[in-house]
Image: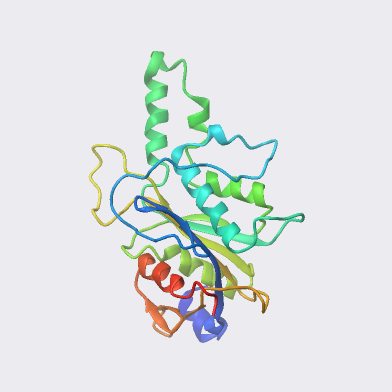
Amino acid sequence: MSTERLYWKGVLKHNMFITGISWITAGGAGRGGSEDTFEFSEGVLKDIPGKEFPPNPVFRRGRLDRFSLLGLQTITNALHDAGLYEWSEKREIGIVSSTVYGCLKTDLDYNDSVGAEDGSLPEPNLFTHTLSNIFLGYAAILFGLTGPNYICHEKTDNSLTALLSAIECISLGESETMLAGICDVEPPQNLQVSEKVRPGAIFAVVEKSPGSDKRHFGMLSMDKMFNIILNDTIIHNIEEFVNECLKNRSGE
């Protein structure tokens, strides 16, 4: 069903709430509930810590490619920030992430390994990470998430595709809580790219009905022109979205 039809059926008129947010960019890493400074700058990502993942017999942190590690660490931080890290029973929480390059660097590295030694020794660990949605599956396993789970190819400069998709999922009743974000590492060398694409990951937790005592960073909705509205402010890009959230760090 199109966003336009959803709106006129009255489905997109609820307010939703941002209850957690995190980022790892070339400018640094942080969470909404901390005093960390958000800077979505150009440059090279620093080492990604890859910490605080729950233990699980099917998960090996050392096997992650850099793209998957970036996305999974940022999702972990966002769940911490929203108070959703701990769990005992599976939860109907979904994840949608947009990306420009996806795991292209990993794909190329795997292709190089296929060509080595006359193709006799392709790298199996690289092969298992040659899909861009791998880190979403890991997040679902580690945190008991059973909601919608998919990757969007980001075609716009505003990086809001995943957030729009999360709003639609909640509005349709597919899930009452969604993680929405972006994830991109630096592009492979010699690839002609848009200067507007900056490496990093940003994820927010969107909840339809958080508890009345739960801190949040403001109310999220959509107007008749399909603009994203956060705290009565029209959001034009992901950077504006994070900065608007951080104005409400006190949870007012």
Can you tell which quarter of the image residue 205 is in? bottom right
Residue 75 image point, x, y percent = 54, 54
The vertical placement of 209 against 180, above or below, is: below
Q: Camera-side residue: 44 or 133?
A: 44
Q: Camera-side residue: 120 or 109?
A: 109
The vertical placement of 142 against 80, above or below, is: above
Residue 70 image point, x, y percent = 47, 46
Q: Camera-side residue: 228 or 169?
A: 228
At 67% from the left and 77% from the top, the residue drawn is 213
At 65% from the left and 60% from the top, the residue drawn is 84
Quarter occupied by the C terminus: bottom right
Q: Residue most toward the right?
A: 89
Residue 104 image point, x, y percent = 38, 40
The vertical placement of 89 against 214, above or below, is: above
In the rendered image, is residue 130 in sight? yes
In the rendered image, is residue 204 in sight? no
Can you tell which quarter of the image residue 238 is in? bottom left
